[in-house]
Amino acid sequence: MADALARAGYPRHVLVACSGGPDSLALAAIAAYFARRGHVDGHPVTVGAVVVDHQLQPGSGRIAADTAEVLKELGLEPVEVRTVTVAAAGMGPEAAAREARHQALEAAADGQGADAILLGHTLDDQAEQVLLGLARGSGTRSLAGMRPARGILLRPFLELRRADTEEICAVEELDPWHDPTNSDPAFARSRTRVEVLPHLEEKLGPGVAESLARTASILQLDADYLEDVAESTYASLVEREGPGAALPEEALRTLAPAIRFRVIAKAAAAVGGQQPSYQRLQAAEALLRRQGSAGPVELPGGVSVYRLSLAQLEGGEGPLAPGTPDSADSVPREGPRCGKLVFRPSKKPAK
């Protein structure tokens, strides 16, 4: 905990996110030690807490209230309960709950003037995250797992096993709440926790979780480097055109594929899109090969990508608005010289 707060620049007020489970309750107990001391390595610190009630289970309000009382007894101040409504809105239940929770945590941090939010994720959570990423066929960023620090979010326990947090609770005479959804086979993460990871430990020997977490740490370094290169490359190439953006075709072709895909994804995000899947990125990148259609390729979040030849650009022409009849046929399919990939927000068809 002290190392995490030191790396974060010794925040003056930190906020513990606590569900009442073993991991976050152990986190609160350790944070309370520094709250009682009033400093970390001589740097003053105060510690508050927030309990998020997702209202997804019967009695969740009572569990949240009981957890808040325990946190107050530990000496954390202020302690608040934030009730959220989880709306799927096109995403899975776990993702929707996570988004609602993070919004509540950020609001609580703003209200308390907290410089950091402490989360209780452990090495076991990290191992599960890597396994789920592998199952989805994800790239480097996803397999890099959770970061020890991301913005004001700090995860001091990423090197501890879940058994360690349970032992902390026992030593501190705390009675944690065990969320039944953590063992519910309806959720992929629960199946990974209860069935997959124990099976791997049994068949491959102990240390699988540590190896998966170590893999995430290694890939974090790779992902950070690739992200830095992609960001500087994108900044040097992008041409903003009103609500859209353009990237020079010839320069894109010379990039290493790992950087090229990331630059295309950044252009899509810059005009309001979401992170494209690998398949959608491949479809957009294929426009550079000048084989078949010059677009549009639709990316998630309402973004259309076109290839415009230099001849068309010099003629002052641009792609027709998405949804316009024969818009795809209007974009030149071949060109003797290189042009641009243009990213434009798509207009939703009228109902």
Image: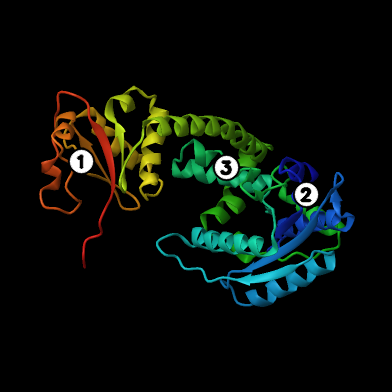
Residue 75 in which image quadrant: bottom right
**Which residue in the protein does label 3 denote?**
145
Percent of width and height locating residue 234: 41, 33
Amino acid type indicated by mark 2: Asp
Label 2 sits on residue: 164
Asked whether the beta carbons under mark 1 and mark 3 sit within 8 Å of each other, the answer is no
- The scheme the figure's colours follow is rainbow
Q: Amino acid at mark 3?
A: Gly
Query: For the point 25% across and 56% down, which residue is it?
Result: 347
Relative to 337, is 7 on the left or the right? Answer: right
Relative vertical location of residue 341 with respect to residue 187 in this rendering, above or below? above
SS under mark 3: loop
Q: Where residue 342 sits: x, y (%)?
A: 27, 39
| Of pointers 1 and 3, the one earlier in the residue sequence | 3
Q: Secondary structure at mark 2?
A: helix
- The answer for how far apart the CA atoms under marks 2 and 3 are is 20 Å
